[in-house]
Image (cartoon, rainbow, N blue to C red):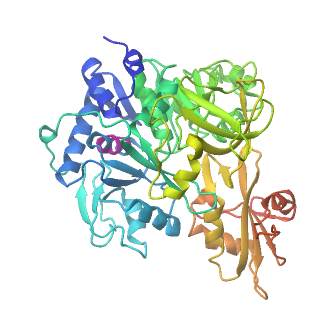
Amino acid sequence: MTNPVDFARAGPQTFPEAIARHAVTCPTHVFLRDGESSLTYRETHEAIERLAAVFASHGIGSEQRCVILMENGLDYALAWLALARLGAISVLINQAHLGDILEHQLRLAAPDAFVLDEVQAGKLAALPDQSQIEGATVFHGTSAAPAAAPYPMGARVVDLWRAPGDPAALAPIERPALSAIQSIFYTSGTTGPSKAVAYTHTQSWQTAWTVAEHLDATDVFYMTNPMCHVSLPHCLGAALLAGGTLAVRAKFSASSFWSDVRAYGATVTMMLGSVANFVASRPVAPDDRKHPLRKVLMVPLLEDVSDFCARFGVTVMSWFNMTELSVPLHTGGFSHMAEPLPLRPRAGAMVRIVDADDRPLAPGTPGELVVRHDTPWQISRGYWRNAEATVDAWRNQWFHTGDLFVENPPGHYRFLDRMKDCIRRRGENIASFEVEQQILCHAAVEEAAVVGVASADGEQEVLAVVVLKADASLAPEELLDFLGDRLPHFCVPRYVTPRREPLPKTPTGKVIKTELRETAVREAWDREQHGYRRRR
């Protein structure tokens, strides 16, 4: 049997193609696990073919857009793969979104269909604006039998798992154009609403390959990351290209982490954001090294990453990536991290540090990281229905990350800060603009500015500076109650600073957020100190 990694090394294909091949070469090897449920490669292939046939029988085909909005799990992964099988474009929306943000993302995608669970169906049915839902086909996306869910008014509802579908009626799997869009992922806006990233099949493959080349068929990848993020092609794809197994948990749980690792026999996992901090902060135990985990993908690296490796008996790999990219920088594989390794360009990736005029800077001088590749379509095609933002990000034939890096020594790259007005909290990117817009909806608010401030977990917390209208009053608890029904839970501010004086601004009217970061947190009301518990 050909080694799956050798097969993957030959170059980009689609994920359904890889699964179809593994269904022949290693049919009984388990590919997907979720609790007590498991599917071999052959069973996964058969499930994808049947679901694709159901989609196709209801008019879903090449380049049509289908929103997936439901809980993490095998059902989610199979629906995503079945849409890729047809050449349809899956639109992946964060399950926590609601209200104006959800409506904006639906308007941007203009979907032809939806794959929903009952919770998300109820959320869509409650939206005041049903224009993006009317006339669309809604698929009940979970293998559990549907209850009396409040599906959107006027929608044609199809039970994806029980509707008839004949895989024999499908055309043979064909490789799409290298430029074909597999999915739309949403990324945080910085000066406006969130943007929709057109993510290609080649991008998925290359993102997965950066990890898969360091795995093999015996590896079990334990995934706790949201499937609405590019963690989906990163984690699922890495397991797939290596011919290994993907074990899925709906949400990360620090208390269940090691028991899950042992139960699944997990050998590799991804720790984004503060996850590594949560794992490391657990009390030292005599069985800290009594587990099968050996490889950890960690971003950002803990300051004491060598202690983490020694305590848990693992090796670590790190990288730099964005939704628009396919891992241009990484540490070059897993190691015991005697000291944090530098980020280097991977094979085929070209990077520069440039000034505001896109002129290359000398090593040691901080500037913006820009990226290119030596083969096409490894970077996103652009922002869906946002030509202006696409042209700006790809100006001068380089993708502009908006992140501040330094190259020192030559060939070694280090992240310094985000140039964009974006907050990173608990593994989520938060657009300050979108949070500000919801704060401004409150009748007592005149102005609002949202910034990220340092967190003990290694990422950031959300700070809202709120200028009240004359004669108006607004307690921080009241504001958080108001925002709890309008924002995802991870966007709700931890710190609130009410004030009467206007926000500090430049002569051109832009808020000076650096000043707020330095001063406002000292004056802020902290929900953690006051015992406030926001609603989920």
Instruction: Report the quarter where the N terminus lies.
Output: top left
Residue 476 shows up from this direction: yes
Number of disc labels: 0
Where residue 420 appears, x then y in whole percent? Answer: 68, 52
Residue 266 shows up from this direction: no
Left or right? Give the position of 308 relative to 86: right
Q: State the residue at coordinates (44%, 62%).
A: 108
In-front residue for pair 380/19: 380
In-front residue for pair 451/98: 451
Where residue 321 appears, x then y in whole percent? Answer: 59, 37
Instruction: Judge whether 149 appears above or below 44 on screen.
Output: below
* Main secondary-structure element of the magenta-colored stretch: helix
In-front residue for pair 12/256: 12
Q: Magenta stretch: give its range.
A: 77-83
In-front residue for pair 252/21: 21
Q: State the residue at coordinates (26%, 32%).
A: 45
Q: Extreme bottom residue here?
A: 471
Instruction: Report the quarter where the C terminus lies.
Output: bottom right
Q: State the residue at coordinates (26%, 43%).
A: 86
Instruction: Judge whether 202 appears above or below 229 on screen.
Output: above
Left or right? Give the position of 422 relative to 15: right
Where residue 214 appears, x then y in whole percent? Answer: 52, 19
Whether 437 is among the magenta residues is no
Left or right? Give the position of 468 relative to 202: right
Instruction: Judge whether 238 appears above or below 480 on screen.
Output: above
Where residue 165 appears, x then y in whole percent? Answer: 16, 46
Whether 80 is among the magenta residues is yes
